[in-house]
Image (cartoon, grey):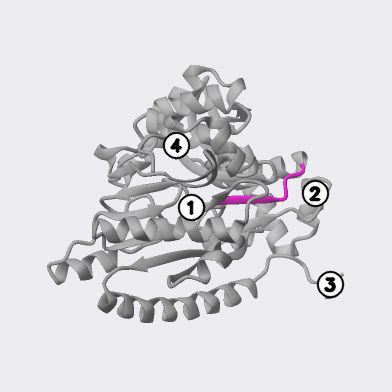
Amino acid sequence: MVENLAQVPAADWDRLAGADNPFLRHGFLAALERTGCVGPRQGWEPRHLLLERDGQVIGACPTYLKHHSYGEFVFDWGWAEAYERHALAYYPKLLCAVPFTPVTGPRLLCAPGADHALVCRALASGAVQIAQQARMSSAHWLFTDSQDSQALEGLDLLRRWGCQFHWHNQGYRDLQDYLDALTSKRRKQVRKERREAAQAPVSVELKHGDELSEAEIVQYHALYCSTYDRKWGQPSLTLEFFLDLAANMPRTLILILARRGGRAVAGAHLLRGQTALFGRNWGCSEQHRSLHFEMCYYRGIEYCIEHGLARFEAGAQGEHKLTRGFMPVRTHSFHWIRDARFRNAIAEFVAREREQTAHYIRATAEHTPFRSAADG
């Protein structure tokens, strides 16, 4: 276990993480640490797990000691409150996740050629052992991909389901091709919103990290922070973090900026993987009709079509995305609860929650914005 990812050579970590998911790369996770986004003061203490064989790292897990449940997007506040009512401590807990990032991906990283199931079991068992020895209330694995979910399902863990809305590229040649796939009602809605955004007295531009000036990043960060100021929240990502990403992951970071008079008045930041685009945050100092939809959804869809990306994930939750072509997708998390009494009660809760989530996904999917074959 290491308490600073800088202790792990980037090449060793990235060999396990792969190149598809940018949030798992050494550059992203280490940037969170060195720019003050995570650490003891933030309640995210790195405790990254490593599995070695013959002196070589064959498995790893981005893991944190958590002193709260902020920035996770799999909500267990009710569990913490139940512990508190019984004069028990829910925090600290052990968390395997990417901070502030509700994006599905590998959590139990495995070296190419190694036995994935064996590595996953060893990493998961190691996390539980650490939590047991420290008498923590629980250990959690959030937004696991299908391979990790299959490995974790064989262990004595509780499984939760969630729902997000993702846009999938069906081989569209251009944006018009995508619009033609929508029903008439939804096609008119998209065109109306894009028309309204175009009428705003701003110019919108998409730039990669290596195309951005420091001033543009500073302006975007101020917009990003303003969203939290209005909602009485605390911004998680520092200005230094964005500058770090622009310098060290220049083609991964994307900013979409709306300017008026040469200054950014609205912005969104996204990250690009090999096969997918991930929308993360938005901020603005001026309100313009439909500009949020244009910058957070339609520009991303255009980008995916232009660059041949298969998927666009525009953040957590948000059934309003459905009418704009984002379809419901089930997400997964796994949880180990040390106290058997609480485990039994939570098990009943997550069983009911899974049924409700399955029903919600089926119900929302019925309201597809896409034309059926019968529509011609």
SS type, badge 2: helix
Query: On screen, 123 above or below 205?
Result: below
SS type, badge 1: loop
Q: Earlier in the sequence, mark 1 or mark 3?
A: 1
Task: Please tell me the numbered disc located at residue 176.
Answer: 2
Q: Residue at x 29, y 68 (%)?
A: 338
Q: Residue at x 54, y 77 (%)?
A: 358
Q: Earlier in the sequence, mark 2 or mark 1?
A: 1
Amino acid bearing label 1: Pro
- Give the CA separation, mark 4 to mark 1: 22 Å
The reply, left or right, for residue 3 in relation to residue 375 is: left
Quarter holding the N terminus is top left
Which mark is in front, 2 or 3?
A: 3
- Label 1 belongs to which residue? 102
- Label 3 belongs to which residue? 373
The reply, left or right, for residue 18 in relation to residue 213 is: right
Q: Few, some or many C-alpha atoms within 10 Å of disc 1 (few <14, some 14-19, many ≥20)?
A: many
Amino acid bearing label 4: Cys
Task: Please tell me the numbered disc located at residue 284.
Answer: 4
Q: Earlier in the sequence, mark 4 or mark 2?
A: 2
Amino acid bearing label 2: Gln
SS type, badge 3: helix
- Give the CA separation, mark 4 to mark 2: 28 Å
Provide residue 168's location: percent of width, then percent of height: 70, 56
Residue 238 seen in the figure: no
SS type, badge 4: strand
Query: On screen, 1 above or below 190?
Result: above
Of 366 and 36, nearer the camera is 36
Query: On screen, 340 above or below 273?
Result: below
Q: Earlier in the sequence, mark 4 or mark 1?
A: 1
Magenta residues span: 308-314
